[in-house]
Amino acid sequence: MSRVGKQPVKVPAGVKIEIKDGIFHAKGPKGALEQKIHPDMSVAYDEKAGVITVQRPSEQQRHRALHGLTQRLIANVVTGVSAGFEKKLQIIGIGYNAKAQPGKLLINVGFANTVEIPVPKDLTVETPSNTQIIVKGCDKQRVGQFAADVRGIRPPEPYKGKGIRYDGEYVRRKAGKAFVSGQ
């Protein structure tokens, strides 16, 4: 069995689960999400024990791969509706800053104009300081994609390290050109 796939998903209190027509629905304090389940996988919810288990029909390579994937997708949905997800970004560079406004994020990272990014309705963006951005939401994929889009505006460059990076991301630095006096 798959090490990941055989682990049961614990459902916290306050989260309602429903499995209908091959779609997994979860509703909790942070929102509601749904995840389509592959037809080969069988998902069972034990309400008394508060756990969700995923079973596979055979030991084929495809079924083994889908087993772990399905378990992780369901676990992400349950975690998202109960606790939510967040990504933190840092802006490094002189004069670089960001400001969150209702429905949009304004970023100034050395371009002639300020970059304005519309924020999706299911996400919240905070700027506790002008060099920090926090993206929060219940859908892990949407939070990660929006954070990657923001980072893609000005990825960190290897010479001075300036740009937008994930909190705790290591940027490998390169040595600049060495000055050699001509004779």
Image (spheres, helix red, strand yellow):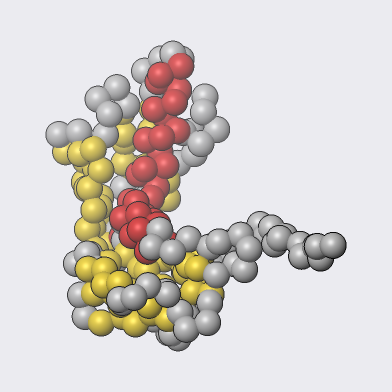
Q: Nearer the viewer, residue 81 or 148?
A: 148
- Quarter of the image for residue 16 reads bottom left
* Image spot of residue 125 (x, y percent): 32, 74
Q: Residue at x 60, y 67 (%)?
A: 161
Of residue 85 and residue 53, the one placed in the foreground of this image is 85
Relative side of 169 to 79, left or right: right
Q: Nearer the viewer, residue 98 or 123?
A: 98
Question: Which residue: 70% across, 62% down?
Answer: 176
Quadrant of the rendering where the C terminus is positioned: bottom right
Q: On screen, 141 above or below 125?
A: above
Q: Residue furthest front?
A: 183
Residue at 45 percent across and 23 percent down: it is: 64
Find the residue positioned furthest to the right.
Answer: 183
Give percent across and percent down for residue 114: 31, 77
Quick check: can you spot residue 13?
no
Q: Is residue 51 left or right of residue 173?
A: left
